[in-house]
Image (spheres, rainbow, N blue to C red):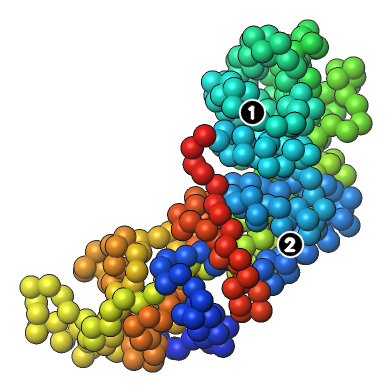
Amino acid sequence: MRPTDDGAPYDEYFRSLNEELKKNGPMRPCMVIDLDRMDRNLDLVTQTLHRGAKHYRIVEKSLPNRSLIRYVAERSGARRLMSFHQPFLNIDAEVFPDFDILMGKPLPVHSASLFYRQLRGPFDPSRQLQWLIDTPARLQQYLQLAQSLGTRLRANIEIDVGLHRGGVDSNATLGQMLDIISANPQQLEFAGFMGYDGHVGLGVPHILGTAEELFTKVMAIYRGFVDYTRSQYPKLWHDGLTLNTGGSPSYKLHEAEKISTEVSVGTALLKPTHYDLETLASHVPAAFIATPVLKATGPVMIPALDGNSKIFSWWDVNQRETFYIYGGYWLAEYASPKGLRFNKPLGHSANQENLNGSSAVGLQVDDHVFLRPAITEGLLLQFGDLITVRGGKIQDYWPAYSQTG
């Protein structure tokens, strides 16, 4: 019944990374991107999409950093981006003036208005930007915006392919929207469809079907909307429409289908813990939070119990060392050294998180604790500049996007 020793020191990868960060790092909480590992993941994505004759659209919310996006674009050859946040959209348009940008969610029409008001540079939204539209009512709002601006907006219609978080779910609704577009050719252009299949391979109980079975249903729904539009609105249909789909959990499944023209992938390049999935088994973690140990205080001590706390460390070898790290309370899991645990009785701290472990972890003050983020969107914005490493050595510091316009 007595707990066994879960602790272990750094493996060679983290030992080397710890030494590099102690020597050349900022000695504060930081997000580390391993470019060698990310290259491996990115190559898997691009090779798969190439075999399936699909275009690759980079997902900005998962990689919210202009240098990171530029690196991925240059290595993959992609010039398509999916944006999700109006301030970021304005950055994207200025920094990547030759990209085609598709919105990944419908924005309030006032947010779209702010984009046009803050637009700088040669980026031409009438040719390069696709607004995601989910309802006839929102399409009417965007029509009024186009009329007030004296411009033409490209409308990509969000279709519900089984995720059920909004979007067109019937031909009747789709017909209403295509009627509006057809009646207003000076203000609206049909740009295609976006059918996100985030439930395939992620978050759906296996009892409801395998990833492959769910995927077959997804593409049948997608094909239904395509067939309806081609037959009922032939004047709107043409080569070059954006038929977007996919996501990190499902991108491999799209290699064989012939309906979509492009697949969006972002998080799979860094593989946080939430994406430890069967469909991404060949991918490797490429993003780590690294933070220094500020204090090492010995066996666990519970406030108010004082000396009586010894019973905890006597019983459980994993409570015989206590460490306070710089920062904490992140949406992440401890990765190295192995066996570190958050001290629940003391509660979380975003200032100095309290960790326990056995003596086997071998940590000293100024060593680093490494964590794997659970997700990338949001978390990559919490640490300032991303620190890139290659061959275990720091290469550069890449500034994060600003959250405000």
Q: Which mark is residue 273?
A: none
Are the residues flagged by discs 2 and 1 in contact, CB closer than 8 Å? no
In the picture, measured across the screen, residue 48 lies left or right of residue 238, that is left
Give the spatial CA distance, label 2 vs label 1: 31 Å
Three-letter amino acid code at the position of disc 1:
Leu
Q: Quadrant of residue 117?
A: top right
Query: On the image, numbered disc 1 is attached to which residue?
Result: 119
Q: Secondary structure at mark 2?
A: helix
Rendered residue at 69%/24% (across/down): 170
- In depth, the one of 134 and 59 nearer the eye is 59
In the picture, measured across the screen, residue 125 lies left or right of residue 166, that is right
Rendered residue at 31%/76% (across/down): 294
Expressed as whole percent of the image width and height from the top left, the position of residue 350 reads 31, 60
Expressed as whole percent of the image width and height from the top left, the position of residue 51 reads 88, 57
Q: Secondary structure at mark 1?
A: loop
Say whether disc 2 or disc 1 marks the residue closer to the N-terminus: 2
State the quadrant of the N terminus: bottom left
Query: On the image, numbered disc 2 is attached to which residue?
Result: 42
- In depth, the one of 402 and 189 nearer the eye is 402
Rendered residue at 72%/67% (across/down): 39
Three-letter amino acid code at the position of disc 2:
Leu
Q: Quadrant of residue 243?
A: top right
Rendered residue at 80%/35% (across/down): 242
Q: Is residue 56 visible?
A: yes
Q: Is residue 84 visible?
A: no
In the picture, measured across the screen, residue 16 lies left or right of residue 66, that is left
Disc 2 versus disc 1: nearer the observer: 1
Q: Is 361 situated above or below 143?
A: below
Q: Residues within 10 Å of mark 1 (few under 14, many from 20)?
A: some
Expressed as whole percent of the image width and height from the top left, the position of residue 151 reads 73, 15
